[in-house]
Image: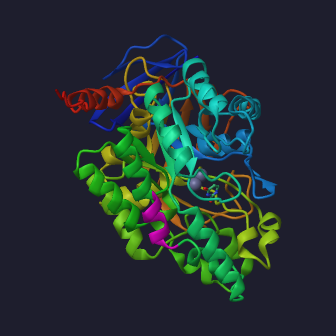
Amino acid sequence: MSIVIRGGTVVTAEQTFSADVYCENGLIAAIGENLEVPAGTEVIDATGQYVMPGGIDPHTHMQLPFMGTVASEDFYTGTAAGLAGGTTSIIDFVIPAPQQPLMDAYHQWRDWSEKSAGDYGFHVAVTWWDESVKQDMATLVQEYGVNSFKHFMAYKNAIMADDEILVNSFARCLELGAMPTVHAENGELVFQLQKDLLAKGITGPEAHPLSRPPVVEGEAANRAIQIAQVMQVPIYIVHVSCKESLEAITRARNEGQRVYGECLAGHLVIDDSVYRSEDFAFAAAHVMSPPFRSKEHQAALWKGLQGGNLQTTATDHCCFCAPQKAAGKDDFTKIPNGTAGIEDRMAIMWDAGVNSGKLTMNEFVAVTSANSAKIFNIYPQKGSITTGADADIIVWDPEASRTISAATHHQNIDFNIFEGRTVKGVPTHTLSRGNLVYKDGDLRAVKGAGKYVKRQAFSPVFEAMAKQSAANKAQPVNRK
Ligand code: DUC
Ligand code: ZN
Ligand code: ZN
C-alpha cells in the first residue's frame, strides 16, 4: 500500500519545511517537493495543514489489574482511541505482582497486547528483588527489546519499591544499559497520611490530594535522583506534577546529571479544585496519583517544558468507570487511581501549548514524540519524518476545532477529564506504519495491526556517562 501526503508543511522537532511525504510498505520512502509517485498511490491533500510524527505516549496502563479491579480500556480500544487523537505508539507497563516472575508477567502483558491497533512496547516494573529478577531483567533487555524498568516508590504493601530494591535495580539497569524510571511519591508518608485523614473522618475524594502533597513527591524524586547519582545511572521521572520534583530535576540537571522528566497533559491544564466537588462521582473520576495540583504547580510544569527540564508528555492513561470508582465511596483510599487521556493529549498540548505561545510547533513535536523516542532509543524509527522511518504520521489542521466529551470520545471510559474543553488544532488523518487508520472522524483501527517495538539497550546517554565515570574512577591509595 502506498500513500502520498501532498502540499503540507512538514514539522519535526528540528525543522519546518514544505514537502510531500511518500509512504510505501509501512515506511517513509521519500520526502520532497512535487514528488513523482507510482500510479495508484492514494493521495492525501494536506494543503494548509501540518505533517508531523505520530504521537508517542510513553506512559499508559491498558487493562491494568489494579486496586482490586481491572482498567476498563484494553489494548485494542486504548490504542484505537490513541490513533483517533494522533498518537500512534505507546509504551505501557508490565507490572508483576510481588513475587511474580518478571518473565511470567511480561508474557501475560504481551498476550493482552496482541490486539493492539497501534504500535506498543513495555517498561517492566521491578516490584520485588532476588537473583531471578536480576536474571530476568537481562533476558528482557537482551532478548525481548525492553530497555527501561519502572519503580513505584508508592503503593506500600503492594508494588512499592524500597531503597534496597531501587539500589539493586538501578545497578542492574546500569549493567544492562536500561533506563530506570520512577513513580516518585514517598509511599510510607502517603500510607501514614491516609491513615490520619481517615481517622479524622475525612473519607471523601477531597482527602486524596491531602494524602499526597507535593512535598511527598518532591522527597521521592530527590531521593531517586540522588540514588541514581551515586549509582552513576541516568534516570527518568514519570508524571512530574509539582514544583518540588521539578526543582529536584532541575537542580540535578544543572549539576550535569542525566535526569529526564515527563509530565502529563492532565497535570498541565486541570487543577486540584476538582477534588472539592460535592459530586462524588466527579471528584472520584479525577482520583489519580500523583493528584492534580494547584495552578501554581501547573505554571511551573509549563516552564519546565519550556526550559527543557521536562522533556516528554504522556497521559498515564488508566481508565476506571464510575461503578469501579464507587468502591471508594466511604474510603478514598479504595478509589481506583487513574484517569484517561490518550485520545486528547495531542490536541491539549497543541491548544494549550502552541496556540498560547508556550511551545513552538517544533517543541510540540519534541515533547509529544521525538524526545520520548530519543530517551527510549527508538529514534528516528519513531518520532521523526525521515526517509526510512516508520510511516507514523499525522496530518494536523490548526484551524479545525473539536469539543472534547465522553459522549463522543473513543476511549472506553464513561468520563473525560477534559469534558467541554474546545481545542483548536486536530488531526484530520493518522497513518500507522503507512496505513490510513483515521480520516476526518472515521476511525479505521484494525485489531491486532499494532506491532511490538523492540528497543535497543545502551542509548547514547549510557556511552556518555560511561566515559564520564571512567574519568572519575576511584583509585586505591598505594601505601608503603
Ligand atoms: N497512578 C495512577 O493514577 N494510576 C495507575 C498507577 C499510578 O501510578
Ligand atoms: Zn505512576
Ligand atoms: Zn502510571
Point out the quarter of the image occupied by ligand 1: bottom right
Question: Farthest residue toward the top?
Answer: 38
Q: Residue 76 location, x and y as percent? A: 72, 39
Nearer the observer, 462 or 426: 462
Q: Within the magenta stretch, is there residue 214?
A: yes
State the quadrant of the N terminus. top right
Q: Nearer the viewer, residue 370 or 293?
A: 293
Rendered residue at 33%/62% (across/down): 247
Question: Given the current orientation, which residue lies at the most extreme left position?
Answer: 480
Residue 306 x %, y %:
29, 56
Name the residue at 70% across, 28% down: 103
Residue 452 forms part of the magenta stretch: no
Residue 205 place in picture, x, y as percent? 67, 77
Looking at the image, which is closer to me, 230 or 306? 230
349, above or below 218, in the image = above
Q: Is 165 rendered above or below residue 270?
A: above
Range covered by the magenta-colored residues: 213-220
Please state if 411 lies on the left or on the right of 294 as rendered.
right
